[in-house]
Amino acid sequence: MVISVDLVLKNIGLLATPMGNNPKKGTEQSQIALIENAAVGIEAGHIVYAGPDDGSLSGGNVFDCAGCLVTPGLVDAHTHLVFGGWRHKEMARKLAGESYLDILKSGGGILNTVGKTREASFEELYEKTSALLDESLLFGTTTLEAKSGYGLNLQNEVKCLEVVKKLDEEHPIDLVSTFMGAHAVPNEYKESRDKFVNLICDEMLPVVAEKGLAEFCDVFCETGVFSLDETRTILEKAKSLCMKLKMHAEELSNSGGALLAAELGCISAEHLIKIDNVGINALSKSGVTAVCLPCTSFYINESFAPVREMIDLGVPVALASDFNPGSSPNLNMQLVMNMACYKYKMTPAEILTAVTINAAAAIGKESEIGTLEQGKQADILVWDSSDLDYIFYRYGSNLVKTVVKRGRIVKGG
Ligand code: IZC
Ligand code: ZN
């Protein structure tokens, strides 16, 4: 049989990919397909064949992968992408021993970024964010989740979400948008936090839902930030508006966030540095995907989430960068993968699953992306490596040679 296609990737030394349209848990997380001497056929932006090179693909352009490793594009399932300014001037305070939450309490941290984001115009934010996405694409990210949460009033939250919407239309990277008005209580509501929760529920969420500006709603559920009760109120309102739910949970303290995420049916619970076995079992039972962020633990000098226990107890684990100007100013997913290997003790196969199909599941895209199989979107990486282990061993370099996004070569053609 001859399959006629637009683009053929041939001479693939090793094709490594998870399989299927669902998040992988337990031992499934390490079960990936490894196919030597493979080829991929692409038609109209989608994969029509991925498997052993049996010579059946013909027509269109042919790209020679020179015996290299080929994987699905990386999915960055947790970023705080749109913000004004940076926070490098807070480094000295951090080095002198002030904690992330102490800096926030004093009006710095997230609130510092809120000030700069409110000052920035739509165009300024668009240009800055577009350049960040360019960088991310060069490191192999082909889909990325972007949370709002530096506007903290209706006008500025909408401004940031509209930047994401426009970039989703115009940039090669596909974006999934999350409303996170409950990221911090802004200074003007410091003495009346109930009013801020009401503002989110009665004003911001209905407008965001009405304008279709976010698929997900997330809350920074943390001791001293948003309580369990406040988180529940906000997420129940979001659910009633047909938004899907996420939670920042158990990042800096064990406060019961994982149990709430399980109870509310969140798609994902994120961070989980301080989760205990009760929380892990709750996530496992209700099928919540854990999104773990090793570069954040590194950068804020915290412990590392108990990922091995999560995998052993049946929680699907995804990995993401947490790119943001405070606790993780890194958007290189290859560094995230390295860190997961060294610090979480995940295997290369588990990590590949975590940054592809499980990350796709954490943002509701597991039927469209995350594996190299017939019918999936053609988001594909060619690596400067002939096997999978090498990319975990060689940290610090950009080992992505070629990026194919929706069937188009966008890097290294
Ligand atoms: O700007 O500090 N953890 N939110 C929750 C963040 C980190 C982003 C920031
Ligand atoms: Zn975050």
Image: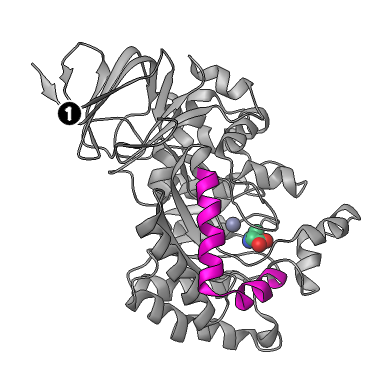
Residue bounds of the magenta highlight: 111-136
Residue 140 lies, with reference to residue 28, above or below; the image says: below
Number of marks in picture: 1
**Tag 1: amino acid:** Val
**Closer to us: 108 or 3:** 3
Apparent side of residue 20 relative to residue 142 in the rendered image (left or right): left
For disc 1, the marked residue is: 5
Residue 173 lies, in percent from the top left, at 41, 48
Q: Which quadrant is the N terminus positioned in?
A: top left
- Look at the magenta stretch and give its main secondary structure: helix
Q: Which quadrant is the C terminus positioned in?
A: top left
The kind of secondary structure element at disc 1 is loop
Residue 253 lies, in percent from the top left, at 70, 57
- Residue at point 55%, 52% (across, down): 132
Tell me if residue 78 can be seen: no
Residue 256 lies, in percent from the top left, at 60, 59
Q: Residue 15: which quarter of the image?
A: top left
Q: Residues within 10 Å of mark 1 (few under 14, many from 20)?
A: many
- Residue at point 60%, 45% (across, down): 293
Q: Quadrant of ligand 1?
A: bottom right
Q: Residue 34: which quarter of the image?
A: top left
Q: Residue 119: which quarter of the image?
A: bottom right
